[in-house]
Image (spheres, coloured by chain):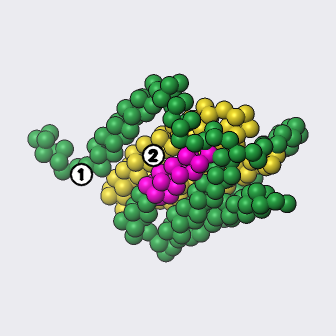
Amino acid sequence: MPIQYYLFLSLALFSIGIMGALIRRNAIIIFMCIEMMLNAVNLLLVAFSKLHSDASSQIFVFFNMVVAAAEVSVGLAIIVMMYRKVHSVDINILNRLKH
Amino acid sequence: MDIYEILFWFLTVVAIGSALGVILSRNPIASVLFLIVTFFAISGHYILLNAQFLAIVNIIVYAGAIMVLFLFVVMLMNLNADVEPQKGRLLQLAGVIAGGILFLVLLSALKNTPVINVDKQANDLGLIKNLGRTLFTQYVLPFEISSVLFLSAMIGAIVIGKKEGSTEVKEK
């Protein structure tokens, strides 16, 4: 299997994640798109690990998952807090930093 | 076309199709479920690439823990397709064009790279024994630092999620 296929697959997943982050207004969906982008990068790292027979990049994927888990716990706490205050997860309401 | 390639194309179609489902479905719960399908497809790719440990960890951590957390939050807020905020058509079109142009630029930058085949031979690189040895010898310091990161994330989540009233009582 050529490495290009894995490159294009993770590129497609990453681009879909970016599109989702741009076209949706729900904060949770945007968060999920970020998770999808992280997973696209993880997939590419594992493919390169197999290509070069190097375990280091699999360890890197492991740390990626650690950071993603920590990020999700804090981010969802922030979203829940926001929801408690404004009763919405619409990101267009959350532009108070502008004013 | 052997079984490896058939599995590769099947998992690729499932991954991209459900990734599109995540961003296109109106119902947030459907989005969460589509994302779980995407993660399972990516785990299948990990198994094809001989990263069995990461495949299992991906299912346990992502599909098991993170997505359940998302599902809980979506259900807690009682989100459904009726209250789902939508961007205007123009902004959606702009987003799709921006993402598509990024895809095309990177694709054209990468399409002339020399073809290197990932060998289908199984190796024991992704097994727990090998990965554990690498993790606890070469990368033991980042491992310990990530434990501190987890602790701070845990405390941060509790502090952020705490009700306002309890801090106000303390301030008085």
Which quadrant does the N terminus of chain B fall into? bottom right
Q: Which residues are magenta?
A: B51-67
Across and down, in percent, residue A21 comes to: 59, 53
Picture quadrant of residue B36: bottom right
Mark 1 crowdedness (10 Å alpha carbons): few <14, some 14-19, many ≥20: few
Picture coordinates of residue B17, whole percent (x, y): 68, 64
Closest to the observer, A16 or B17: B17
Q: Secondary structure at mark 2?
A: helix
State the hue of chain B.
green
Task: Give B2 or B69, whichever is nearer the viewer.
Answer: B2
Q: Residue furthest left?
A: B172
Give me the residue at 23% from left, 51% from top: B163
Screen quadrant of the C terminus of chain B: top left
> In percent of the image, x 82 and y 59: which residue is there?
B2
Image position, residue B3 (x, y; %): 77, 61
Locate residue A29 relative to residue A94 in the image: left or right.
right
Can the viewer see residue A23 in this picture? no
What mark, if any, has residue A69 been given in the picture?
A: 2
Disc 1, SS:
loop
Residue behind mark 1: B163
Q: Are marks 1 and 2 in contact (CB under 8 Å)?
A: no
Residue A26, horizontal then vertical, whole percent? 51, 60
Q: In the image, is B23 to the left or to the right of B108?
A: left
Residue occupying the point 32% across, 58% down? A84
Between residues B48 and B89, which one lies in front from this camera angle?
Answer: B48
At x 36% / y 65%, what residue is drawn?
Answer: B76
| Front-lying residue, B13 or B75 | B13
Q: Chain of mark 2?
A: A
Kindly report the distance in space between the C-alpha atoms of the residues bearing marks 1 and 2. 23 Å
| Chain A, chosen colour in render | yellow
Which amino acid is tagged 2?
A: Ala
Which residue type carries mark 1? Answer: Lys
